[in-house]
Image (cartoon, rainbow, N blue to C red):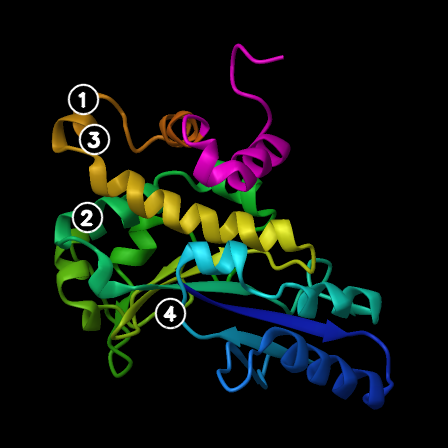
Amino acid sequence: LGFEQEVEFRGHDRYTLHSGAEKVLATMNNAPEDIVYLKDDGSLSNGFEIVTHPMTLDYAMNHLKWGGITALKRMGFESWSTSTCGLHIHMSRNAFADDKHLFKFVKFIYSNRIDLVRFVGRESSYAKFGLDNFVSSWVDYDTGIRQQNSLMKMLKNNDTNNDRYCAVNIQNAHTVELRFFKPSLNVTTVQAALQFCKASFDYTDMLTTREVVGNNALAFMSFRKWVRNRTDKYEVLDTRITERCGAMMGED
C-alpha cells in the first residue's frame, strides 16, 4: 500500500506553508530512509501532496509517524473540508492472486456505491462510481466513439481504459489506485481507508464463485459482517463503518 494525501493551507502566510511541508518531512522520515516525499498538484491552490513509498498495512498502523499529519491541523491546514483535496491509495497490482481476484475486488467496489459514499464521506467527478462508465471509458479522441468492454476483458488489458478519474483507476502499470476516499487530517480516518483496502483485498481473495453468485457475497453488508469478525486486524475500520453507515441490524 501507498497513499497520496493532498492538504491545503487556507491562510496567505507562505512561511507557514513551507513550515508545514518541512514539519511533515522532518517528522515522518527516518534518516537515512525516506518514507514520504512531497509534490505539487495542479488541483491545489495553496498546498501540497504527501506521498508515501509502498508499505505494509502493519507498518502504516504501527510504525508510520502520523504526527507529521496531525501537526498540520494545529498549524491551520485543511483537507476534509476542501473541494480540492483527495486521498488516493495505491495497491500493488501483482499482489492480486489472478485476474479473477482483481475482478471480484473491482466488482465489489462498483457494486456498493451508496454504502461506500457514506463510508468515505463524498462522491466526486474525479473518482466516478458506476460500472457502466468504467467498462466504456475508452474513448477514441479522434472520433469521439466510446468503446464498450466486459469487466474481465478490461482488467486483463489495462490499456483499454483511458479515464483515470474513476473510483478505481487501472491506468498505472504497477498499481491499482482507489481514488474515492475523502482526505482528513484525523489519523483514524486515513487509517480506516488503508484498512478498508487491505480488508477488501483479503475478503475478495477468499470468495468462491458460488459465494459471489449464490450468497450475495459482494454486498457491503456481507463484507461488514466479515470485518466485524476480525476486529483484531480491522478495529479502526469496523468503528469507522459503524460511525458513517450506522449499526448493523440487531445491534443497539
Decide which of 124, 85 is in the foreground and name it.
85
Instruction: Work out how far the residue at label 1 is from the one at label 3, CA to CA, in angstroms.
Output: 6 Å
User: Which quadrant of the figure contains the N terminus?
Assistant: bottom left
Tag 4: residue type?
A: Arg
Report if the CB atoms under discs 3 and 4 are less than 8 Å apart.
Answer: no
Q: Secondary structure at mark 4?
A: loop
Indicate the quadrant containing the C terminus: top left, top right, bottom left or bottom right: top right
Residue type (three-letter) at the residue carrying disc 3: Val
* C-alpha gap between disc 4 and disc 2: 21 Å
The residue shown at (31%, 57%) is 134
Q: Mark 1, mark 4: which one is toward the viewer? A: 1
Q: Main SS type for the magenta part?
A: helix
Residue under label 1, please give it. 214
Q: Residue at x 83, y 66 (%)?
A: 74
What is the x, y in percent for residue 71? Answer: 76, 68
Q: Earlier in the sequence, mark 1 or mark 2?
A: 2
Q: Are marks 1 and 2 in contact (CB under 8 Å)?
A: no
Numbered disc 3: secondary structure:
helix
In this picture, which residue range is highlighted in magenta?
228-252
Which mark's residue is nearer the viewer, 1 or 2? Answer: 2
Quarter occupied by residue 68: bottom right
Residue 79 visible? The answer is yes
Q: Residue at x 59, y 50 (%)?
A: 122
